[in-house]
Amino acid sequence: IPIYVKELIAGGAAGAFAKTTVAPLERIKILLQTRTEGFHSLGVFQSLKKLLKHEGFQGFYKGNGASVIRIIPYTALHFMTYEQYRCWILNNCSALGTGPLIDLLVGSAARGTAVLCTYPLYLARTKLAYQVTDTRGSFNYGGVRGLYRGVGPTLTGILPYAGLKFYIYEELKRRVPEEHQTSIMMRLSCGALAGLFGQTFTYPLDVVRRQMQKYFLGQAKVDARGSHEGNIAINVSVNHVLSSW
């Protein structure tokens, strides 16, 4: 089997497993970010209890099917393009070396490719998470462009998030003693720390993206003309952003 096929399969399987594992927290995050009625003033654990009471256990996984359908090609493309871009740069731009600049560039390019290819599925997952309408509404409202509402803030956050995530992950791995390099727990720890730092740094952009998506479902009053206007119209205070952490 060609190595890029193995990367596609491994990346897709890993992404599907990870998304399903954290699906309850992912749905709560969407409900809090979009300030859904009855949830915007609650904390994480209170929201989980309320969701369980009103929708049962299955409520935790509402929209997870769309999420998995998106995450399989997304993660597969992400990891495959990361390896392919990295090999291409190392072979054709050897003067850049193998330092942090490579990790930043390659991580950003790989995530950008994956986002552009799978963003409509991401929008569908957001809609299903709080039951407003179906994806056809977006297409009917704005054509193909409607399926990419909110992609601006997503791409804006690619450079700091994806770049930092891969850079920190690679740096942490380099500092792990050689005898522990193949340890699953060590790789999980490095990945968790890298993802935590990158997500925390770019979280405000994630809130803006959700609000822009919700606008085109007819339930928000923000101006979604662009990333900058979205930031101004939403007027997300520090407390509002932190409320969904």
Image (cartoon, rainbow, N blue to C red):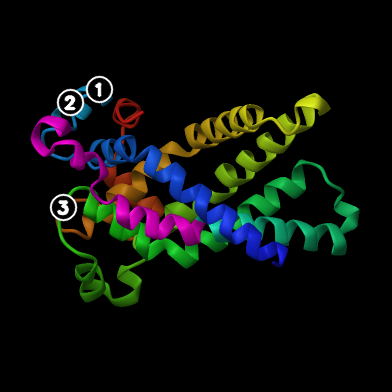
Q: Position of residue 225 (x, y in %)?
A: 32, 61
The residues colored magenta run 51-74
Categorize mark 1 by other alpha carbons within 10 Å: few (<14), some (14-19), many (20+): few
The residue sitting at 41% across, 45% down in the picture is: 19
Q: Callout 3 environment at 10 Å: few (<14), some (14 to 19), or many (20+)? A: few
User: In the image, residue 114 lies at what x, y percent?
Assistant: 53, 60
Per the image, is 67 magenta? yes
Residue situated in front as seen by the camera: 242 or 58: 58
Which numbered disc, 3 or 1, marks the residue that appears first in the sequence?
1
Q: Which quadrant: the C terminus?
A: top left
The residue tagged 2 is 49
Q: In x, y percent, where is residue 105?
A: 69, 52
Residue toward you, 77 or 185? 185
Q: Secondary structure at mark 1?
A: helix
Secondary structure mostly seen in magenta is helix
Q: CA distance from mark 1 to mark 2?
A: 6 Å
Residue 131 is labelled as 3
Identify the residue shown where x is 34% and y is 75%: 144
Q: Is residue 14 visible?
A: yes
Give the quarter of the figure containing the N terminus.
bottom right
Q: CA distance from mark 3 to mark 1?
A: 21 Å
Marks 1 and 2 in Cβ contact (< 8 Å): yes
Amino acid type of the residue tagged 3 in the rendering = Gln
Kind of residue at disc 1: Phe
Q: Amino acid at mark 2?
A: Lys
Tell me what residue is drawn at x 20 percent, y 42 percent. Answer: 58
Residue 210's place in the image compared with 149, above or below, is: above
In the rendered image, which quarter is residue 174 located in? top right
Q: Quick check: 69 left or right of 182?
A: left
Cα distance, mark 2 to mark 3? Answer: 19 Å
